[in-house]
Amino acid sequence: MLLVVVAIVLFLASRALRATLPAATALAHPSPSGGEVAEPAAAGGGETIRPGRMPDLKVVKQETDAHAAEVRDAVEKTAE
């Protein structure tokens, strides 16, 4: 009885493996255009980061404070 159960499980496992093989081989060979990366949509997103260095924390704090003030003003306007 146990042998029959093991045989059925192995049969179902082999069928599942065969069903996934085409997708697995497609993932193994990337498409020719797979290496292209689009430019980010947000303009000026990385301006505070100097090339090859850490971001300027004073500028980041100023921008964060300005954004917090904008959010605070927006919340106050919607509360009115």
Image: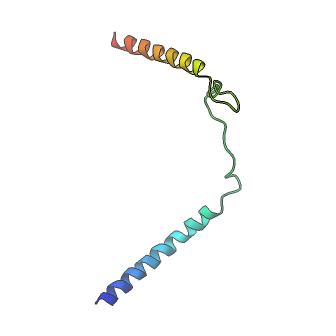
Q: Residue at x 50, y 72 (%)?
A: 19
Which of the two residues, 59 or 35, is positioned nearer the viewer here?
Answer: 59
Task: Tell me where residue 30 sits by quadrant.
Answer: bottom right
Q: Is residue 28 left or right of residue 17?
A: right
Q: Is residue 7 left or right of residue 31?
A: left
Q: Position of residue 14 (x, y in %)?
A: 46, 78
Position of residue 72 relative to residue 31, above or below, is above
16 and 49: which is toward the camera = 49
Q: Residue furthest left?
A: 1
Which quadrant, please, contains the N terminus? bottom left
19 in relation to 78, above or below = below
Q: Nearer the viewer, residue 49 or 27?
A: 49
Residue at x-position 55% and y-position 71%: 21
Q: How is the image coloured?
A: rainbow
> Which image quarter is the C terminus in?
top left
**Percent position of residue 38, x then y:** 66, 40
Image location (x, y in percent) of residue 79: 34, 13
Q: Nearer the viewer, residue 79 or 44?
A: 44
Q: Which residue does the image show at 38% across and 11% down from the upper left?
A: 76
Q: Is residue 80 above or below residue 37?
A: above
The spot of residue 65 in percent (x, y) is 50, 16
43 in relation to 29, above or below:
above
Q: Number of marks in the image?
A: 0
Q: Is residue 46 left or right of residue 8?
A: right
Q: Going 45% across and 73% down the picture, which residue do you hit? A: 16
Residue 22 lies in what quarter of the image?
A: bottom right
Question: Would you identify the image quadrant in which residue 78 lies?
Answer: top left
